Image (cartoon, rainbow, N blue to C red):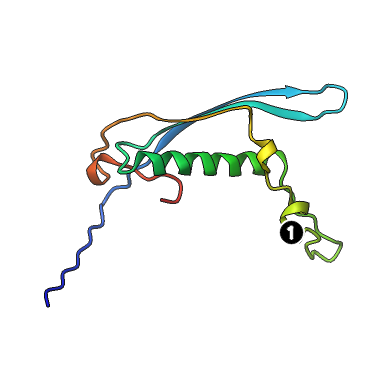
């Protein structure tokens, strides 16, 4: 049987670059904040799988929205977490997604990453 393996470690890192744009509405009486629009653009070089790259951008963006807008861990006086499930944690739900939520890839040809690609979040 013939078996082959290989790997390559680049001396450089292929950084992605991105920009995010949000439009919010603030109820000045209650202080409630509503996220109406969110656009996420990412220069990730030439993605090997564009649909997977877009899915990663949407997921990471929604997670960041949750961190910023609704997620919270509450602790008791001894430092033990009182927040023990997703309902009390405040993770975003389908109704929390902005009405106008778009992600886009900005193509470029990265000279460091494989096939012109860079990294995207954790892929």
Is 45 situated left or right of 91 in this image?
left
Q: Residues within 10 Å of mark 1 (few under 14, many from 20)?
A: few
Task: Give how far across and how far down residue 50 sits, in percent.
Answer: 36, 39
Query: In the picture provided, is 107 more to the left or to the right than 32?
Result: left
Looking at this view, name the residue that lies furthest to the bottom: 1
Q: Hey, which quadrant is residue 15 in on the image?
A: top left
For label 1, the residue is 85
| Residue occupying the point 75% across, 29% down | 33
Q: Is residue 107 above or below residue 11?
A: above
**Residue 26 placed where, x, y %?**
76, 23
Quadrant for the N terminus, please: bottom left
SS category of the residue bearing label 1: loop
Q: Give percent across and percent down for residue 60.
A: 53, 43
Q: Residue at x 76, y 61 (%)?
A: 84
Of 31 and 54, nearer the camera is 54
The number of callouts visible is 1
> Which residue is painted at 33% across and 43% down in the image?
49
**Which residue: 81% across, 23% down?**
27
Position of 80 compared to 64: left or right? right
Q: Position of residue 92 (x, y in %)?
A: 67, 43
* Name of the residue lying farthest toward the front: 94
Considering only vertical position in the picture, is 24 above or below 96?
Answer: above
């Amino acid at each position: 049987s013939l078996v082959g393996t290989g790997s390559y470690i680049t001396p450089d890192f292929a950084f992605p670059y991105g920009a995010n744009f949000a439009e919010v509405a603030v109820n000045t009486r209650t202080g409630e904040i509503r996220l109406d629009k969110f656009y996420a653009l990412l220069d990730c070089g030439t993605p090997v799988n564009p649909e997977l790259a877009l899915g990663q951008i949407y997921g990471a963006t929604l997670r960041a929205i949750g961190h910023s807008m609704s997620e919270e861990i509450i602790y008791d006086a001894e430092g033990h977490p009182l927040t023990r499930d997703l309902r009390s944690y405040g993770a975003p739900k389908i109704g929390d997604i902005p009405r106008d939520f778009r992600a886009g890839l900005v193509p470029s040809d990265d000279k460091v990453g494989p096939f012109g690609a860079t990294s995207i979040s954790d892929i």
